[in-house]
Image (cartoon, rainbow, N blue to C red):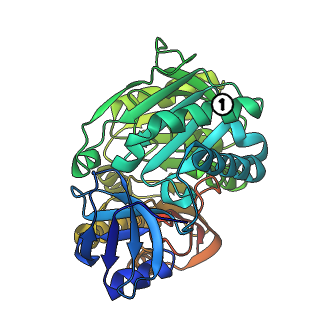
Amino acid sequence: MERNYPRATVTEKGEKALRGGHPWVYAEEITDLSGEYKNGGLVDVFSRKSRYLGTGYINDNSKIRVRVISRNANDRFDRDFYARRIRYALDYRRTVMGEDFSCCRLIFGEADMFPGFTVDRFGDILVTQVLSLGTEKIKDTLYSLLVQTLADMGEKITAVYERNDVKIRELEGMEEYKGFYPGEGLRTDLSGVTEITENGIKYTVDYINGQKTGFFLDQKYNRMAIRQIAKGRTVLDCFTHTGAFALNAAAAGAKLVNAVDISADAIEMTRRNAELNGLENMEFTKADVFDLLTELYKKGGHPYDFIILDPPAFTKSSSTVKAAERGYKEINLKAMRLLPRGGYLATCSCSHFMTETLFRRMLHDAAEDAGVSLRQIEARRQSPDHPILWNVPETDYLKFYIFQVV
């Protein structure tokens, strides 16, 4: 098949990465560009020996110069191509999520071969984020296909809301914004607040003003995993956000759950979610978790026998990993000291840059400094609607452990 796309030639390092399955070509890995192209358009990528390596979106504004979307030289990048990709992604979610298909991540960027594209489903609402210029240029097609394919599966979508209010877009030469997408048959007059059910618990989700897309779906099954341990215990849920771990613990029959967050809005949302589910075995504390753990330890005793640590990402780049490691160690060390022998700790990191090796080392050091041993109960990852591609390390980001302190 005759190729009419511009041609990018890459270094040996770039070739090795692509042949290993990674979809990114960095600016310094391109040695030659031939043919006219526009940012966000498609280019073919070749090795120095003219071996075809893939086709992807090019963008001179980005350090990631090319984002590969196909390794098949015979692909035609028309509506049918993207329809197949979307159907594949949706069929996968319906298979692995089962009844949870109505509330899950439908598209997870590079893990679904859609560079920089995120789609979360909250019932009949899709909340999207586009971080790649190439994807931005075809989003009308993608939104149309998503709505139509879901309709073919018997799943009606009422609205699509774009959460493109992130600074990363500036690195791709795009503007920040958010708002309802005015597609055919889609509503643009909704309040931005909807209700979902996860693990049998109801949540109010603010997809206009909430963090990221409004709700963190990746911890779905990790929240379920803490239920058995929480039953009958006094639980401290740190960095509660919308109260998801706290609500699961309370619904499981915890004696008492204290949901803590520095954000007054988060505490109010958690309070409303507790009322929505009729949960009365909860209390709510607006506080800095680092300060609160210190104060509780100084007071002495062991007021909680189960502590949950679900902090935001302390690092979003390799340059801040050491500072992040200190932050993770501080909260875990304080929690371990605060727990009684036989108490339980659930702890996690949602940063790709805080690798599994670093996180485990940090936990080991914290336990040693606290003078305790950790009996591992479970080691978990993100839910399967956020799939991990082994050849794309960036897709493997969530580490979640449950321990008994002995």
What amino acid is found at the position of numbered circle 1 in the picture? Gln
Q: Give above or below for 369 relative to 175.
A: below
Q: Give the quarter of the image for residue 281.
A: top right
Towards the viewer: 307 or 34? 34
Considering the numbered disc 1 on the image, is that residue within a helix, a strand or a loop? helix
Q: Percent from the top left, x then y, of residue 47?
A: 39, 82
Residue name at image x 46 percent, y 43 percent: 240
Q: Is residue 151 left or right of residue 192?
A: right
Q: Give the quarter of the image for residue 261.
A: top left
| Residue bearing the label numbered 1 | 148
Q: In which quadrant will I find the N terminus?
A: bottom right
Towards the viewer: 179 or 153? 153
Q: Percent from the top left, x then y, of residue 176?
A: 26, 36
Q: Give the quarter of the image for residue 381.
A: bottom right
Is residue 327 visible in this depiction of the protein? no
Residue name at image x 31 percent, y 36 percent: 165
Q: Percent from the top left, x then y, of residue 394?
A: 44, 66
Q: Give above or below for 175 relative to 171.
A: above
